[in-house]
Amino acid sequence: MGAVALITTAVVQNKPLPKNMKYGIVLDAGSSHTSVYIYEWPAEKENDTGVVQQIDACKVDGNGISSYAHDPPVAGLSLQKCMDKAREVIPEQQQRETPVYLGATAGMRLLRLNNATLADEVLSSVGSTLRSYPFEFQGARIITGQEEGAYGWITINYLLGNFLENSGWLGRLKQSATFGALDLGGASTQITFVSKKEIESQENSLHFRLYGKSYDVYTHSYLCYGKDQALRRQIAYTIPDANNSTILDPCFNSGYRRNTSTKDLYSSPCIAQQRISTAPSNIEIKGTGNYQLCKQKVEMIFNKTQCTYSQCSFNGIFQPNLEGEFGAFSAYYFVMDFLKLTNEKISLERVKEAVKTHCSRPWEEVLKEFPKIKEKYLSEYCFSGTYILSLLENGFGFNSENWKDISFLGKIKGSDAGWTLGYMLNLTNMIPAELPYSPPLSHGSYIGLMVFFSILLVFIILTCWLSLRKPKCLQKGII
Ligand SMILES: Nc1nc2c(ncn2[C@@H]2O[C@H](COP(=O)(O)OP(=O)(O)OP(=O)(O)O)[C@@H](O)[C@H]2O)c(=O)[nH]1
């Protein structure tokens, strides 16, 4: 049984897996993008200790599949370029044996909240496209936030080799050394880590048995706290102050301008409580580039006032004390990498200074220095850096002391950090609950030892026989 099947909401696979799988494809249909990842199995599939590797990846042009809600058939068509690439990468004779999975994340969770029929139509459109390829299509579904957190945690610890390190007899005795997982998407964010403390809320508690060792894991997925939805909320807070449809926004560099339609802004369920009927239909955002003011606005989205447990992160969500090291990936990495802040030796104070400095730079200057970076990404690094700091510090409780425990991870041993690998490992039963039986000695060593001991035995018998005969000879000599 796949270990993550212990999650009550995990997929129950109804199709048997192909027998000679050597490759696997997972599509991550996120809120901002869809990406296709191609994985290759180690040569010996039965040898579960081998590491499955990402051999290729492709980003689908445009936005996530949920953005095709107005025209669901196009959602499937949008995948063609990357699926054609997968057909080129995977040898023809292996294609029929290659499973394809599509997991949709927070963008589709939001669409399902708004219009479940449209969400089904989008999934069925991607399903018919994926079925038209020679691979073994295993299904398209919206994964839960809990699964997204759990699979991200499994991916990074699998790639870092932590499960195997913990599985030996010494590893089983000591406290489990795993990395917690921090995943920042466009529409949701996940925090997942092993906790020694009791997990007071059932919905945040997961139990895994992997390679013979048990893990009690805390996880929570915050819908609407991905960086794109957080930015929308931050902008929506300012609309009541709009003057002649213009808002001054400290989270964009000074000199930056952007037009936004309020209909589009308000179309997200994340803004439900912030809608005002008197909002102008279009607004112009003018950046003022001020980190402190941006931080104040961003912090408005974290409600720290109510908590019915012994302790909470924000919005009344239970969170035990942070424990151990953490790997932060997806947008955490994109943003911190751009700001050159991924080095673990950089203190929290220096990170704040760097974000502050970036926010205060005029947009013209930023644009001139990075002409090749997509304007959407470039214009949002001030907001994103500020949001990441607020989420980690104000939201999850990181501080100057444990900041050094966070590693910002892009790829680990050539594979992207994210939920997709963990998802595939689970569905293909690549991580066993118990350690696969391996004889203490290989066949060759066993034969070698047997020969050695046989020779030793013959030698001992011969020596004894000779020493027993000796006195007689000597006796004869004396006589
Ligand atoms: N700077 C930068 N940002 C990126 C890049 N790719 C994606 N992003 C942004 O990073 C955020 C997270 O993107 P993804 O990792 O694709 O997350 P997602 O699949 O949209 O996330 P959810 O659906 O919320 O789970 C989004 O705001 C994207 O716009 C990139 O190459 N560079």
Image (cartoon, helix red, strand yellow):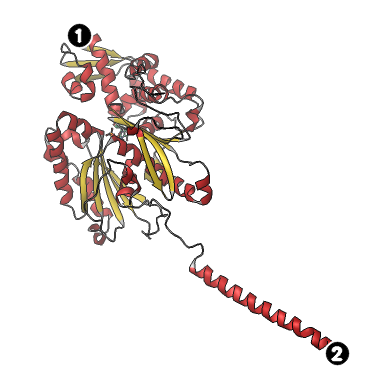
Label 2, secondary structure: give it.
helix
Asked whether 172 or 68 is in front, the reply is 172
Mark seen at residue 112: none
Mark 2 vs mark 1: in front? 2
Label 1 amino acid?
Asn
State the residue position of label 2.
477
Residue 18 placed where, x, y %? 25, 58
**Residue drawn where x is 26% and y is 18% of the image:** 235
Relative placement, left or right, of 423 versus 169 is left
Residue at the image position 43 percent from the left and 24 percent from the top: 397
Left or right of 325 in this view: 132? left
Q: Secondary structure at mark 1?
A: loop
Q: In this view of the protein, can residue 272 be seen by the observer?
A: yes
Image check: 323 left or right of 457?
left
Residue 39 in picture, x, y percent from top left:
32, 51
Taking the view exactly as shown, the residue that stands out farthest to the right is 478
Q: Quadrant of residue 28?
A: top left
**Rendered image: mark on residue 244:** 1
**Percent of width and height locating residue 185:** 31, 32
Q: Earlier in the sequence, mark 2 or mark 1?
A: 1
